Amino acid sequence: MNTLEIKKSYEEINGRIKKGDAVIVTAEEMPSIVTDLGVKKAFQKVDVVTTGTFGTMCSSGSFINIGHTKPRMKASRVWLNGVEAYGGVAAVDCYIGATQVQDDDPLNKVYPGRFLYGGGHVIEDLVAGREVRLQAKGYGTDCYPLREYDRVITIADLKNAILFNPRNSYQNYNCAVNGSKKTIYTYMGILKPDIANATYSSAGQLSPLFNDPFFWTIGCGTKIFLAGAAGAVAWHGTQHNPHVQRGENGIPREGGGTIAVVGDMKEMDPAFIRGASITGYGCSLMVGIGIPIPILNEELAYFTGQSDSDIFCQVIDYGKDYPTGEGEPLCETSYAELKSGFIEVAGGRIPASPLSSYPVARKIALTLKEWIRQGFTLGAPQVPMPTEDFRGTVR
Amino acid sequence: MYSINVLCIFDKSIMYKPIIYRLAKDFDVLFNVLEAKIFPKLEGRIILELRGEREAVDRSIRYLEEEGVRVEVLADKIRRDEERCVHCGACTTVCRVDALTIERATMEVKFHPDRCVACGLCKLACPVKAMSGNSIDIE
């Protein structure tokens, strides 16, 4: 963070937000502003750039406190609609993970498995206010004598339901193809043999961490849009890695940074959080995240001004190289190419389809813009994320 | 010329009976087999594109039904739940007939039921179960 030069302060930006004259644009609108005005003038003009992403994020889940029963119970095993939540925390706390499936799920025994209902769906049902069956078992103690509990509840009956996702909003992600001889069913969707189609999962230019590639404004304590509610970045996410291959514009060309996020499920909107069933793979959760980027200096205007044609990812063979953990990327492709619907791989032109929703990502960035117009202020991260220096130059 | 895609279900009593050839012979309807599956001792399923004069196609469908074939018009069969669809796009490269396409300007997924041949791949690909309806496979 010692490399961060602040030319326009948080106080200045928040002051304009409060007065109602802050200039707020989305990361989709910013590239043309930077192209038209140049970086310097774009920095002077724009105060905040809003971002958005909506995709499947497996490393998600919720801490739930079911409230004390009468008589009291140490709920050491807990199920919600038949999906087991981890009960190895305090008496009536548990954590339900997005990828946990129902105890009697046939998994991949009939291949490819359908994974119709899991932790992600429980989270969606709770947020949507639907009824959920809560079952719990305890072994009985002097202070917590009750051994069994079985009740239909809604989120209103829960003491707390706090979404806590250890790894979300990957800065960049692979583009997947299948070089094997059979159709495969992966977390990157259905991939046809002989490299016949490609899938990718990023909002590209709209995606939060592409717009602040060195995490100058994103860190523990940053207020964000999380599934329709105001949430926060809790920490850097698991597998967070700032030391990756980057373009001259500083933007990672592979994986890179991640964030852990937290928010109150009782305030969330089911339009921005959805259970997911990924055929042959498992259950998961689609999460909507938006992060406001304060334009503190010219570099941030430059980063947020980068568009899909400036952002690249690696094409990986999920038929062989990914599962074995060996091999090299087949090639690189830009998000502009991916979004055109076709990419070039191994000499062939193949259709590419997204797995994360660009329309919902756009809606999130626009919603966040509206929130800021109505007074949602920005703050400096309280604990910075691990990063590295920007060695490129602003053109 | 009128064209329609239909799913024909032959139960086990008629699944080995020659019926389809009559569409061309007696009704002057061009048929194109888009997909076919035999479920031994249970039923046969075939997806046909029927082409011809509207009246001839309608009469040929009535004939199929008289022979005991269950005929379902595919444009009415595979449905998209607009509330559930999040426009992620996962269905678009598995769709073989461009019934599910992305409008590039908005990146929204458009559904064209008239092109659908009910192969059912979109139901497998959709992570939020927005696609439903009868397809060549028995659920």
Image: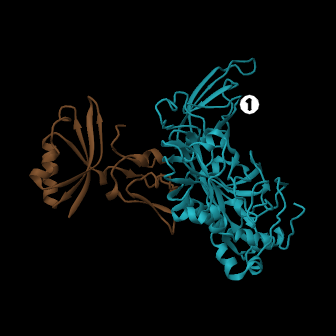
Residue that lies at the very extreme toward the front in this rendered image: A347
* Chain letter, disc 1 residue: A
Residue in view at x 68 percent, y 66 percent? A50
Chain B, which colour? brown
Q: Residue furthest left?
A: B26
Secondary structure category for the residue under label 1? loop
- Applied colour scheme: by chain
Q: Position of residue A128 (x, y in %)?
A: 55, 47
* Chain A painted colour: cyan
Image x and y of residue A99, in percent: 60, 38
Answer above or below: position of A260 versus A154.
below
Looking at the picture, does residue A30 appear above or below residue A102?
below
Residue underneath mark 1? A89
Figure quadrant of the N terminus of chain A:
bottom right
Disc 1 packing (10 Å; few <14; some 14–19; many ≥20)? few
Quadrant housing the C terminus of chain A: bottom right
Q: Is residue A185 above or below residue A313?
A: above
Residue B30: x, y in percent?
A: 19, 55
- Residue in view at x 86 percent, y 70 percent: A6
Measured from the top left, where is residue A209 in percent x and y? 71, 59
Most foreground residue, B48 or A61? B48
Q: Is residue B50 left or right of residue A322?
A: left
Q: Looking at this view, is A329 or B52 the one in front?
A: A329
B62, above or below B12, in the image: below
Amino acid type indicated by mark 1: Val
In the image, what residue occupies the spot 63% across and 47% down? A57
Asked whether B92 or B127 is in front, the reply is B92
